[in-house]
Image: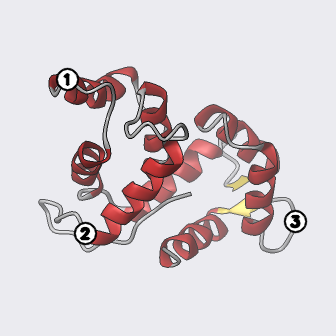
């Protein structure tokens, strides 16, 4: 899961080299066929990887329409960096982490189970191998009790952010 630490002003902030690097890494992962651009489905996966949610049809159309204006077959890296960078510049990492946790915690129990992880990832990232989801859960479940609290979830996200 990708996440970011930022310094904020009321208007947001400039996109950093770190943001560009992360967006580039996501682009490479989503452009599996090495076409040099992202298709509609690829853009959806990029949004999931960067922001932790599946984009609406109108949000996906926004990205695709920008590419079509320039007569491109899909969204190239420079356009993705430009559009995603604007979105990243105003995002609060704590709120994002809480939002993702709450989306996973569909039963509002205050903790996540392996089943919660698997259901969330099957909806948000259906191409992600089940084994990868299981490994991620085991890593986040620090005391191996089968439950992940928000505190543990936030710690794992922060660790991932710090390792970028």
Question: In the image, what residue occupies the spot 50% across and 38% down?
Answer: 45
Question: In the image, what residue occupies the spot 67% across and 36% down?
Answer: 127
Does 40 appear above or below 127?
above
| Residue 57 percent across, percent down from the top left | 39, 21
Distance, label 1 to label 3, CA atoms, is 53 Å
Regarding mark 1 in the picture, which secondary structure is present there?
loop
Residue 101 located left or right of residue 119: left
Question: Badge 2 local density, few (<14 within 10 Å), some, or many (20+)?
Answer: few
Name the residue carrying label 1: 71
Question: In the image, what residue occupies the spot 30% across and 44% down?
Answer: 80
Residue 13 located left or right of residue 147: left
Does 31 appear above or below 88?
above
* N-term mark: 2 or 3: 2
* N-term mark: 2 or 1: 2
Name the residue carrying label 3: 145
| Residue 59 percent across, percent down from the top left | 32, 29
Distance, label 2 to label 3, CA atoms, is 38 Å
Regarding mark 2 in the picture, which secondary structure is present there?
loop
Name the residue carrying label 2: 16
Question: Badge 3 local density, few (<14 within 10 Å), some, or many (20+)?
Answer: few
Look at the numbered discs 1 and 3 and tell me whether their residues touch, using CB distance below 8 Å: no
Q: Which of the two discs, 2 and 1, sits closer to the camera?
A: 1
Q: Quadrant of residue 144?
A: bottom right
Q: Which of the two discs, 2 and 3, sits closer to the camera?
A: 2
């Amino acid at each position: 899961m990708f996440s970011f630490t930022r310094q904020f002003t009321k208007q947001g902030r400039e996109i950093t080299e770190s943001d560009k690097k992360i967006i580039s890494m996501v682009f490479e992962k989503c452009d599996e066929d090495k076409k040099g651009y992202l298709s509609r489905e690829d853009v959806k996966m990029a949004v999931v990887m960067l922001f932790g949610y599946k984009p609406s049809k109108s949000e996906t159309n926004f990205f695709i329409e920008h590419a079509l204006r320039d007569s491109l077959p899909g969204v190239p890296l420079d356009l993705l960096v430009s559009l995603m960078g604007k979105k990243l510049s105003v995002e609060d990492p704590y709120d994002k982490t809480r939002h993702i946790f709450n989306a996973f915690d569909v039963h509002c129990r205050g903790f996540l189970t392996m089943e919660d992880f698997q259901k969330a990832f099957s909806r948000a990232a259906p191409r992600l191998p089940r084994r990868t989801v299981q490994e991620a859960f085991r890593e986040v479940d620090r005391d191996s009790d089968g439950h992940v609290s928000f505190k543990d979830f936030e710690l794992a996200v922060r660790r991932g952010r710090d390792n970028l």
